[in-house]
């Protein structure tokens, strides 16, 4: 095992979790873990500290990379990513064009399902961060490309089943989408503000898209206590608007 793992234990009523590579030593309040031992272990196995506390080894999934991967800014939230995946019906046979790579979180989620993901990012420093994060996942079906999707999409000779846009220039990209999307394919656009969402909707209205809808998702966790069960007083409110359109 030479990829990152999650080490997890339950101690005094709380979960302790570490995202680690199989090298060196991990110093915790429960003792030292010799991480080199992970190289001969598998997910589901137990690794112990020098004080005898056991940790379960888990294989990281996309939500773990959302929590632990290096970030170049605020990534799209899992609640929004889930809506995009479900609304587009993303499958293992699909090829995806993704624009606005950022730290690569959305590309990682998409790449864990789709056959292939091609992701464009205009900022080179973001590309470097995303590349490091994607290497950690072990995914080999994500291709990062440096460039401005507004111009790059005009030279593409590929077609895609799903196209995701998380960029301020999304409305300028929309008119070019029909040339690179398969009939029946889906466009998904993430917009943080009303004004951007309206610009995208106006641009879509001038193309051959159908089944257009724009929505936001509010996440409200349920809290359990001795007093009773109720919605948590903290919640993930507005993060952005999602536009889904089918070509």
Image: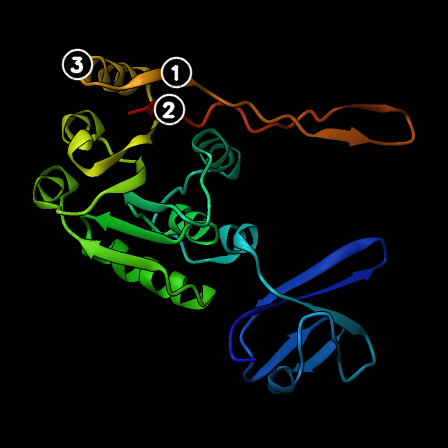
The answer to which of 52 and 29 lies nearer the viewer is: 52
Q: Residue at x 71, y 26 (%)?
A: 232
Vertical side of 45 occupied by 77: above or below: above
For marks 2 and 1 on the same chain, the one whose residue lies earlier in the sequence: 1
Closer to us: 239 or 234? 239
Give residue 233's mark: none
Residue sitting at x 82%, y 61%: 11
Going by the image, does 41 lie left or right of 99? right
Q: Residue at x 36, y 52 (%)?
A: 104
Mark 2 and mark 1 in contact? Answer it, CB < 8 Å.
yes
Comes first in the chain, label 1 or label 3: 3
Q: Quadrant of the C terminus?
A: top left
Q: Residue at x 19, y 24 (%)?
A: 171
Image position of 75 (left or right of 229): left
x, y percentage for residue 17? 67, 61
Q: CA distance from mark 1 to mark 3?
A: 15 Å
Q: Tag 1, which secondary structure?
A: strand
Which residue position is annotated with label 1?
A: 213
Q: Observer-nearest residue: 72 or 113?
A: 113
Q: Position of residue 169 (x, y in %)?
A: 18, 31
Q: In the picture shown, does residue 204 fall above or below 112?
A: above
x%, y% of residue 51?
A: 81, 81
Dot 3: few (<14), some (14–19), or many (≥20) neighbours within 10 Å? few
Check the image and report above or below for 141 versus 232: below
Rate crowding at label 1 as few (under 14), some (14 to 19) or many (20 or more) other CA atoms within 10 Å: few
- Quarter of the image where one finds residue 179: top left
Residue with the mark numbered 2: 244
Residue under label 3, please give it: 206
How was this image coloured?
rainbow
């Amino acid at each position: 095992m030479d990829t990152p793992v999650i080490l997890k234990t339950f101690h005094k009523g709380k979960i302790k979790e570490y995202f680690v590579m199989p090298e060196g030593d991990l110093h915790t309040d429960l003792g030292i873990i010799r991480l080199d031992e992970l190289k001969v272990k598998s997910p589901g196995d137990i690794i112990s500290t020098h004080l005898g506390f056991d940790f379960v080894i888990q294989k990281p999934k996309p939500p773990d990379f959302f929590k632990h991967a290096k970030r170049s800014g605020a990534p799209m939230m899992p609640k929004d990513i889930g809506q995009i995946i479900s609304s587009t019906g993303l499958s293992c046979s699909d090829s995806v064009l993704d624009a606005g790579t950022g730290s690569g979180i959305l590309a990682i989620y998409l790449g864990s399902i789709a056959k292939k993901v091609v992701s464009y990012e205009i900022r080179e420093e973001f590309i470097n961060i995303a590349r490091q994060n994607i290497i950690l996942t072990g995914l080999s079906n994500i291709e990062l490309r440096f460039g401005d999707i507004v111009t790059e999409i005009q030279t593409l000779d590929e077609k895609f089943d799903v196209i995701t846009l998380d960029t301020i220039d999304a409305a300028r990209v929309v008119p070019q989408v029909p040339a690179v999307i398969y009939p029946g394919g889906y466009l998904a656009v993430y917009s943080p503000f009303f004004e951007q969402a309206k610009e995208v909707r106006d641009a879509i209205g001038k193309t051959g898209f159908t089944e257009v809808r724009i929505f936001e998702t509010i996440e409200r966790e349920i809290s359990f206590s001795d007093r009773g069960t109720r919605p948590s007083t903290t919640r993930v409110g507005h993060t952005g608007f999602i536009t889904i359109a089918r070509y």
